[in-house]
Amino acid sequence: MNGEFVAWEDAKVHVLTHGLHYGTGVFEGIRCYETELGPAVFRHVDHLDRLARSAELYYMPMPYSVSELRGATHELIARNRLRSCYIRPLVYRGYGQMGLNPLEAPVDVTIAVWEWGSYLGDEGKLHGIRAKVSSWRRLSPDSLIPHAKASGQYLNSVLAKVETLKAGYEEAILLDDHGHVCEGSGENIFLVRDGVIITPPQTASILDGISRKSVVAIARDLGIEVVERDVARAELYLADEVFMTGTAAELVPVWEIDDHRIGAGRPGELTCTLRGVFEDALHGRSERYREWLDVLGEVGGVGEADPRVGGAAERAEAAAEAGLPIEAAAG
Ligand SMILES: Cc1ncc(COP(=O)(O)O)c(C=O)c1O
């Protein structure tokens, strides 16, 4: 937190933290995978660059450079002796100034890491999920900034997710303000029709997903045509295959939408091919996509736990049980 390594039980903020009241924060979701080369963060600098751009869009000067945040994250993972983990950097307006003008409030930075399994479940990743088109539209670029990954904006995703879960489905699909298909509550969406992959464009209020970018590159490398264009809701139901991508969820097939079976009702051929290559890239099994990996050993190395962080193993265990971050740091 703001340049200090802090035990997770001490990683606290004041109740008058600006971001807690007004959602004035930006964040990233990043994953580190255990690979043959050691723990490796997937497209780390791409994520940190997006964090910096999100901060800039909300007029938050980041007190640390991307390279400082990268180094701190490496050290944090090493200190916790994690081989794989989820990484959550957060840049937010802190304590010191209430009211809607955030410009006088400090900009605070935290990074937390913890072990986090498949976001939509191992079963969902393997066999696919059931999704529902939410009655909540994805936030409009007239009101907020879909390209920013900003804390307050996630109330939109939360409403869609809760509606979907209460209705008995596993994930929400949001339409944009024109009624075109946009994305999931925390994933980008793709459909396959007649061997062509189709995904909504930048102008459809999507978050410019890093997994999306990676899967598009993989598909094109495999010689599969990828088209970015507006997608009508009914095209989802008529698709041969549908899948979603995101850092937390990775690549997840969708086999049913609004009670319409998609294709044969199981993960399709192209989905399975792309999932295989994408997972090889994530886990360092692909020489071709090696450049996407930020291997820890190349900066600090993963050795013994730092003696300054007492009881790391116990805390890691307790935190994992509680589904909570283990330690937080920055700078
Ligand atoms: C709303 C939303 N869309 C899409 C994504 C997928 O983005 P990425 O692949 O960069 O994780 C995410 C996750 O960060 C998200 O929260």
Image: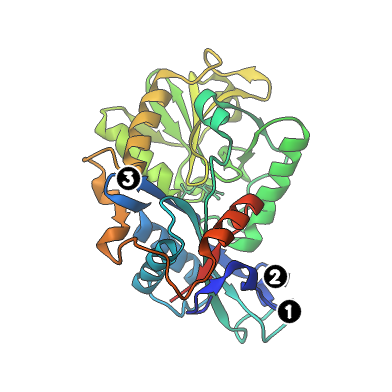
- The picture quadrant where one finds residue 193 is top left
Extreme-right residue of the structure: 166
- Residue occupying the point 46% across, 64% down: 51
- Residue occupying the point 31% across, 56% down: 294
- The picture quadrant where one finds residue 145 is bottom right
Regarding residue 145, the answer to whether it shows in the image is no
Q: Is residue 108 above or below residue 47?
A: below
Disc 1 to disc 3, C-alpha distance? 41 Å
Q: Is residue 305 above or below residue 94?
A: above
Residue 20 is tagged as 2
In percent of width and height, residue 285 lies at 28, 38
Please state which of residues 99 and 6 is positioned toward the viewer in this rendering.
6
Neighbor class of circle 1 (other Cα within 10 Å; few <14, some 14-19, many 20+) is: few
- Residue occupying the point 25% across, 50% down: 291
Circles 1 and 2: CB distance less than 8 Å? yes
Q: How many labels sit on residues?
A: 3
Q: Is residue 314 left or right of residue 85?
A: right
In the picture of the structure, the residue carrying the numbered disc 1 is 16
Q: Is mark 3 within 8 Å of ligand 1?
A: no
| Tag 3 secondary structure | strand
Regarding residue 134, the answer to whether it shows in the image is yes
